[in-house]
Structure formats: C-alpha cells, structure tokens
C-alpha cells in the first residue's frame, strides 16, 4: 500500500519534471547574475561621495535637520587632528567624526564666499554645538596658527598665542551668512535706577529690564492688552514668572485705560478680561436681557458671582 503514495500518472510525472527544471534554471540564473551584469550593484557610496551628495542636495539637507547626532541628546565622538577649516574637504571632516549637517553647512558657507579668519568663526556654523566646538578649537589651524600639536598624541598640545591680526573685525558678509551661520545677540540691560512706564513699554524695552527675557516680556504685553492697560505697578504680580524684585523698574503714569462697555460688549469680549470669567459674563448678559441696561456696579453686587474684591478690581475697566 505504501507504494501507492509514490505512484504518479504520466501527466503528473511530466508536471513534476517541468517544475524541477524551472527551479534549477531559476537558481542557476540567480547565481549567474553578477557575472552577466543583470543584478544591481550592491556597492554603497564611498564616504566622500556620500558627503558631497549631502552638500549639494537641498532635499537631503532638509532631511538632515532631524538627525540627532549633532542636536539631540546623543553625544558625538570626535577623533580630532589639526585641520584648516578653509581647506579641509568633506572626507577629512567625516573621518574626524564631524556630523554630516555641520559638514554640509561648512561647505556651503565656503562655496558662498565665506572664509574663516580665526578659530572662533567656526563656532558660528549651524549644527555645531558649544561642546563640539570646545573640543575642536585647539586643533583648528588658520594660516598654520593656533597650536603646536603633538601629532603622535593629539591630546598633548601646547597652545600658541594667535596673531592679533587674525582678530580684526569680521566682514559684514561673513557675519551675515544665512543659513550657514548662527548669530547670538543679547539686548543690553538697563542700569540701576532706570524706570520705565509699564503701559508704554514694548517687548524690546521690557527685555532690557534685568531678569526679563523674550518670554516674560511677551507675557506682560499680552496681559496688558487683555486688561486694557495697567492701573498700578502691583498688577504686574498677576503675570506669571514676574517676581517682586522686578517691580521697582516700573511706573504707571499713562493710565489711558481701554474700558469695556457693559451694556454693549458681547459674552466673549466680557469673559476674556482677566478679572472676569464665563459665569460673570453670563450674569451681565442675562441681566441685560431680563432687566435692561446696567447703570452702575451696585447692580452687579446683587449677584453672588461678583464679590466686593471683584468689583474693586473691575471698576477702572468698566463703563456703563
């Protein structure tokens, strides 16, 4: 009976032979592809070709913005040796472990006509962190100046004073190259004793106050707009991140307050004021619908939503 399992009809034997033949032919062609030139090349780009492609490809450049090797938490391991940033090629930088985004921006800066006049100029290349630059700085040679390196042990080096001529003022072109260079500017701060008007100061003026940066300045201006203007300096305490030490820099002389007409303002306009909320605004709207116009604050005091402190704070900002 077991022989029945190995019995094939003539048609079945023919089909099996055709199938085996196809398998053998397919496998033979697969093995012969490299010699016939039919299989695509599996060679990867060389290091130089890869970096040159990134340097000249805008699309690749945009993709490299998301690489964490030069901006993220991952630390970049550099293998440094003496180099001139004005002449070194992409392969040399890659060999030292410099991130590809930094290489791309450095090469673009040079192609645009930029030139590094002193080692500190290299720090302005986008993507190069302060930590990486501090490691690279001793190895940067411009006109063969910046250090006397022991090439057998790159960690042992002797710093040589730089030529003062190299510290001449940078050209406006080199300082304004974008997007290859990064620039840092910090607003000068007011000297002690300076007083600024809280209602007349824009964000640029506010940032000159010690302790106030762009974020706090924007919060102050936004809160002032929502209020309709400050009535006194102590209201500044209501702004997040403002400390009591900041108050002595300000005064309020311009009290041209933008008031809200209680009998004309809509629900949204009322509830967006810092001293109001949805429930207070709703009370005003319902009162107008049922009883008509509101004539003074005393009418609002009849509602539990308005406390005595609420009415005192709102008094300068409401009109009837």
Image (cartoon, grey):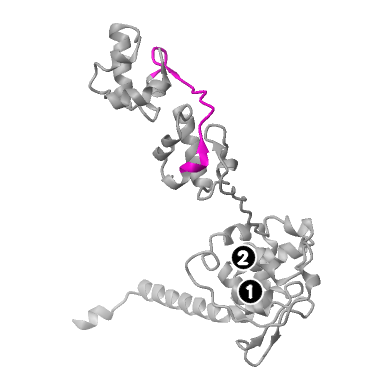
Which of pointers 1 and 2 indicates the residue nearer the eye?
Answer: 2
Whole-percent x, y for residue 71 in the image: 53, 64
Residue at image location 75% in from the left, 68% down from the top: 116
Where the C terminus falls, by quadrant?
top left
Disc 1 crowd rating (10 Å Cα; few below 14, some 14-19, many 20+) is few
Marks 1 and 2 sit apart, C-alpha to C-alpha, by: 17 Å
Q: Quadrant of the N terminus?
A: bottom left
Determine the residue positioned at 42% across, 45% down.
244
| Side of 144 relative to 248 (left or right) | right
Looking at the image, the residue that sits furthest to the left is: 1
Q: Disc count in the image?
A: 2
Residue 19 drawn at (x, y percent): 43, 74
**Magenta-drawn segment:** 247-266
- In the rendered structure, does residue 258 fall within the stretch colored magenta? yes
* Vertical placement of residue 38 versus 216, above or below: below
Looking at the image, residue 282 lies above or below residue 81:
above
Q: Which mark is residue 223?
A: none
Within-10-Å neighbours for mark 2: few <14, some 14–19, many 20+:
many
Foreground pick, 144 / 273:
273
Give the farthest residue toward the front.
193
Give the farthest residue toward the top: 292
Q: Which mark is residue 101?
A: 2
**Would you name the residue on which mark 1 appears?**
45
Q: Is residue 69 inside the magenta stretch?
A: no
- Residue 281 location, x and y as percent? 33, 21
Location of residue 110 with respect to 256 vertically, above or below: below
């Amino acid at each position: 009976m077991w022989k029945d399992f190995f019995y094939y009809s003539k048609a079945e034997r023919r089909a099996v032979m055709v199938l085996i033949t196809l398998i053998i032919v397919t496998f033979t062609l697969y093995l012969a592809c490299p010699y016939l030139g039919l299989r695509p090349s599996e060679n990867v780009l060389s290091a130089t070709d890869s970096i040159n492609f990134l340097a000249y490809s805008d699309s690749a450049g945009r993709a490299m913005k998301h690489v964490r090797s030069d901006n993220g938490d991952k630390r970049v391991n550099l293998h440094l040796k003496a180099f001139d940033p004005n002449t070194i090629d992409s392969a040399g930088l890659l060999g030292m472990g410099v991130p590809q985004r930094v290489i791309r921006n450095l090469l673009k800066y040079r192609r645009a006509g930029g030139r590094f006049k002193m080692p500190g100029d290299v720090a302005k290349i986008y993507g190069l962190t302060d930590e990486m630059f501090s490691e690279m700085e001793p190895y940067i040679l411009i006109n063969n100046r910046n250090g006397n390196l022991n090439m057998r042990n790159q960690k042992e080096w002797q710093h040589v004073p730089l030529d003062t001529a190299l510290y001449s003022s940078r050209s406006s072109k080199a300082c304004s190259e974008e997007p290859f260079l990064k620039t840092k500017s910090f607003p000068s701060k007011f000297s002690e004793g300076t007083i600024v008007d809280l209602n007349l100061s824009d964000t640029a003026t506010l940032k000159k106050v010690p302790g106030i940066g762009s974020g706090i300045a924007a919060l102050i201006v936004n809160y002032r707009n929502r209020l309709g203007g400050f009535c006194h300096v102590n209201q500044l305490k209501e702004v997040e991140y403002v400390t009591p030490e900041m108050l002595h820099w300000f005064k309020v002389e311009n009290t041209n307050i933008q008031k809200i007409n209680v009998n004309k303002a809509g629900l949204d306009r009322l509830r967006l004021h810092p001293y109001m909320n949805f429930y207070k605004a709703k009370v005003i709207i319902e009162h107008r619908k049922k009883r008509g116009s509101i004539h003074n604050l005393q009418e609002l005091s009849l509602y539990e939503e308005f406390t005595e402190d609420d009415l005192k704070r709102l008094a300068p900002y409401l009109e009837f």
